[in-house]
Amino acid sequence: MDRPKILIIDDEEFIRTLLSEVLDGYASKIVELENGQHVLDIVESESPDLIIVDIVMPEKDGLEVIIEVKRKYPSLPIFAISAYLEYLDVAPDLGADEVFSKPIDTERLIQCISRIA
């Protein structure tokens, strides 16, 4: 795989924009969602190589997204992000491949993306 297509799901526009700018040179395409409500439809239509999902969001939280996506696409890598460490502790048990606390260590994020690409 060359540069991966990345789906970023976060209810905070600032975080989505920041991640998009940081990852711009490392991704072939970046798709942004403000919540996990229609994640399976987007995964179906966009075929991302990686999902970066915030844990705490309205409507459908990141833990639900991880469970739902991993059930249908078990090999699709998911990186969970959150300011709440207690949620990050359970994310790997639900299928998250990597976890990042906010503020995000962007250098480590890029290294992890490079490993899957």
Image (spheres, grey):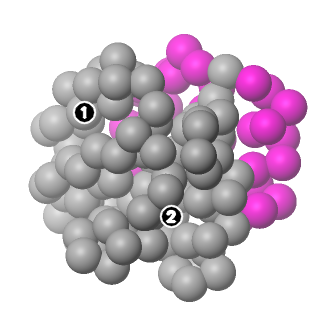
Instruction: Check disc 1: other Cα within 10 Å, few if <14, some if 14-19, many if 20+.
Output: many
Q: CA distance from mark 1 to mark 2?
A: 18 Å
Q: Residue at x 75, y 50 (%)?
A: 91
Magenta segment's dominant SS is helix
Up the image or down, 72 lies above or below 5; here it is: below
- The x, y position of residue 26, in whole percent, is 21, 43
Residue 5 sits in which quadrant?
A: bottom left
Residue 98 visible to the viewer:
no
For residue 9, side relative to residue 24 (left or right)? right
- The x, y position of residue 23, in whole percent, is 25, 36
Q: Which mark sits nearer the N-terminus, 1 or 2?
A: 1
Kindly identify which residue carries mark 2: 77
Up the image or down, 74 lies above or below 91; here it is: below
- The x, y position of residue 59, in whole percent, is 59, 46
Does the segment drawn in magenta span residue 87?
Answer: yes
Circle 2: element type: loop
Q: Amino acid at mark 1?
A: Ser
Residue 81 visible to the viewer:
yes
Residue 40 got which mark? none
The N terminus lies in quadrant:
bottom left
Instruction: Check disc 2: other Cα within 10 Å, few if <14, some if 14-19, many if 20+.
Output: many
- The x, y position of residue 67, in whole percent, is 68, 67
Residue 82 sits in which quadrant?
A: top right
Circle 1: element type: helix
Give the total number of marks visible in the rendering: 2
Residue 20 got which mark? 1
Q: Residue at x 76, y 55 (%)?
A: 92
Up the image or down, 47 lies above or below 16; here it is: below
Range covered by the magenta-colored residues: 84-113
Does the segment drawn in magenta span residue 102?
Answer: yes
Q: Outermost residue toward the front? A: 59
Q: Residue at x 86, y 32 (%)?
A: 86
